[in-house]
Image (tube, helix red, strand yellow):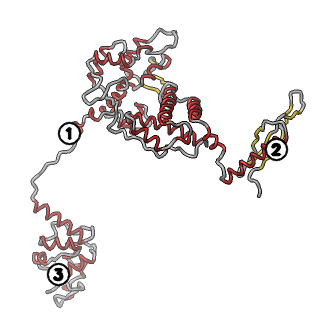
Amino acid sequence: MKSSVVASLFKRKRFRRDGLKVESACWWMRYRCAGELKFRSKSLGVRDQRVAQSRLAEFLQEQEREAAGIVAPRALRDGASLPLADHLANYVGDLASLNRAPGYVYNVRTLFTRLASECRWKMPRDVTVESFQTWRQAQGKSAKTLNEYLDSAVGLFNWMARRGLLVANPLAAVERVDQRGREVRRRRPLADDQVSRLLAVSPDRKGVYLAAVSTGLRRGELRALKWSDVHLDAVRPFLSVRASTTKNRRSVQMWLRDDLVAELRKLMPPVGTADGPVWGKRVPRMVQFKLDLEAAGIPFKDEQGRQADFHCLRHTLGTNLARSGVEPRLAMEAMRHSEMRLTQKTYVDASALPMLDVLEKLPRFDVAAVPMAEAVGAEVDTKWSQNLFRGRPLVSAADIPAIAAESVKEAVSLGKSADLSAAVRQCPEVPKAGELGFEPRQNAPEAFVLPLHHSPKFSAVFGRRLPNPIARRAWVKHHRVP
């Protein structure tokens, strides 16, 4: 049986600086697996040729067993034999190399370490859906916290699966906890008078609060803002928020209103000074923010249990954009969100929207006293004409005589022509036509009745167009000689 792997031994050769050609001391292996186009090289780390041949034979045997499905690939075997703590260290290191936020990396490491300890996971084979669900059922944590534990584990196992260390994520079948109605921390926007009182009681932090409620900058973004990012001398003053300081890692240019420009000019240092932070220690911590709320007479939690922390100023901006009638697409750009659903569902308080004004804009309906008989008659008349002529109302309501209601309703329901005998009695005396449209009334040739579609009565009622066969038979039936 021909081997699926082509391999050979060799020693690497290179030229020294003096031009002499030398060989490496250790043996190397050059191989190509089935389906590959290029050869790969690997050092065996031995100098003895027999030992190198033995290791080459072991490698060929292992590759053939993997191709036949007898043993798992080496990456899976290595991943199964390595403790979860080592996999977590490699995963966290990879996240840091990808420039993930330090807080996110810390949370992933902390949450998974605690989860693995409480679930008694030491090796990858110990991870099961049943063990995680048993642990989750015994917890009293909020839905958001439980989902964060699950996300940390799913992120690690997906990373291992992408690198061939696992066949599949063992927690892929676990569902997330529904957070709707179970939020422990719910934020609310501040009303206009509350924002005014908050700005009045804290003159040192007035610019910080005004910037947060008018630009939507987060606490970390405000703290990282430098004077080189502020352009007050431009035709239209703006801020250049650097990508390294934003949450979505994208730079953005934000226009400034005149009230915020005035506050920034008060704090602007002299020209030529060092490029320092704009707010510095003026960005309040949670304790200081609660003190400012208390001084302004704003409760930290309202009657619905919603709290007002520093991030609620960003919720205030989202709600004010919706109240002002700003288009959702523009509001999403102002909030710097990637999804419109996040802007409309999370950062807009529906209770603060002017719903009463919207109801007043709706049209009002006048319940006029319309006689039911006339309304029903007009409706039946229209249905009869549309059914008789297949959507071509050749006869108007004024041209059609009054017809018995029962006969018309039966005709409409059955899709047939109605009995027009009552209407014929009211019609003026006109020359009758036969079945074929020809019937002489006098001996004079000019007195002969014209063909049906050229007769005066037919033309007056139906015009010059021929109706459908149902209308033709109905007209002939009720105008023939008794």
Mark 1 or mark 2, earlier in chain: 2
- Residue sitting nearer the eye, 378 or 65: 65
Mark 3 or mark 1, earlier in chain: 1
Disc 2 secondary structure class: helix
422 in relation to 136, above or below: below
- Residue sitting nearer the eye, 336 or 23: 23
In the picture of the structure, the residue carrying the numbered disc 1 is: 360
133 in relation to 431, above or below: above
Q: Is residue 227 left or right of residue 29?
A: left
Mark nearest the camera among 3 and 2 is: 2
In the picture of the structure, the residue carrying the numbered disc 3 is: 479
Q: Quadrant of residue 50 in the image?
A: top right
In the picture of the structure, the residue carrying the numbered disc 2 is: 53
* Quarter of the picture holding the N terminus: bottom right
Q: CA distance from mark 3 to mark 1?
A: 58 Å
Q: Is residue 285 left or right of residue 170?
A: left
Mark 3 or mark 2, earlier in chain: 2
> Quick check: can you spot residue 329?
no
Circle 2 residues within 10 Å: few <14, some 14–19, many ≥20: some
Q: Amino acid at mark 1?
A: Glu
Q: Quadrant of residue 147 in the image?
A: top left
Q: Is residue 201 left or right of residue 448?
A: right
Disc 3 secondary structure class: loop
